[in-house]
Amino acid sequence: MQEALPYKTWLPIPREPRINTPTTPLHNQLLLPGTTNITNMVSENAVIVFGRRGCCMTHVVKRLLLGLGVNPAVFEVNEEDEIGVLDELGMVGAGEGKQGAVQFPAVFIGGRLFGGLDRVMAAHITGELVPILKQAGALWL
């Protein structure tokens, strides 16, 4: 009979909170109130997906985009940070002076809020997604 392997996390557990440094991966960055970390991430990536940590819908969006040949940045949010991140995503997605309602997973393509899983799936089925990704610079073919 085989011996069961003990469960261990694959992500290293940080000993101290990390602040944005160029070598810190997206999933370990600490969001600080009053900063524009999310705005910078949205503007610097052709495609970025924001979602809850371990959410199956975020995984579906990521797998769909990977299947199309896009390598999206994925930012997974902890439950404690959810409200603050959603507020900042609402401001980024609606533009200056307005605030819109954003739900997870939120997909930004070309620096603009594209939508959630339903919008991505609908655009994929109708054939609109690939030209949008090409225009944003996420696909070259």
Image (cartoon, rainbow, N blue to C red):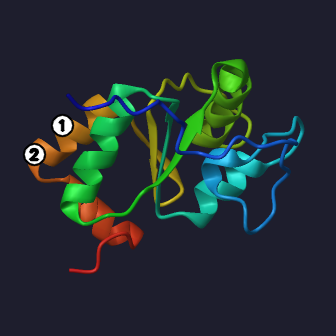
Left or right: residue 113 compared with residue 21 = left
Give me the C-alpha separation between circle 2 and circle 1.
6 Å
In the image, residue 120 sits, relative to residue 80, either above or below, namely: below
The amino acid beneath tag 2 is Thr
Badge 1: residue crowd in 10 Å (few <14, some 14–19, many ≥20): few
The amino acid beneath tag 1 is Ala
Do the numbered discs 2 and 1 sit on residues whose CB atoms are within 8 Å? yes
For the residue pair 105 and 14, the one nearer the viewer reads as 14
For the residue pair 18 and 116, the one nearer the viewer reads as 18
The tally of labels here is 2
In the image, residue 17 sits, relative to residue 111, either above or below, namely: above
Instruction: Kindly identify which residue carries mark 2.
Output: 126
Residue 39, horizontal then vertical, whole percent: 70, 51
Residue at image coords 29%, 60%: 132
Residue at image coords 38%, 35%: 58
Which residue is the extreme one toward the bottom? 141
Quadrant of image for the N terminus? top left
Q: Quadrant of residue 60?
A: top left
For the residue pair 112 and 82, the one nearer the viewer reads as 82
Left or right: residue 9 compared with residue 31 = left
Instruction: Kindly identify which residue carries mark 1.
Output: 122
Residue 79, horizontal then vertical, whole percent: 64, 19
* Element class at badge 1: helix
Left or right: residue 44 compared with residue 103 = right
* Element class at badge 2: helix
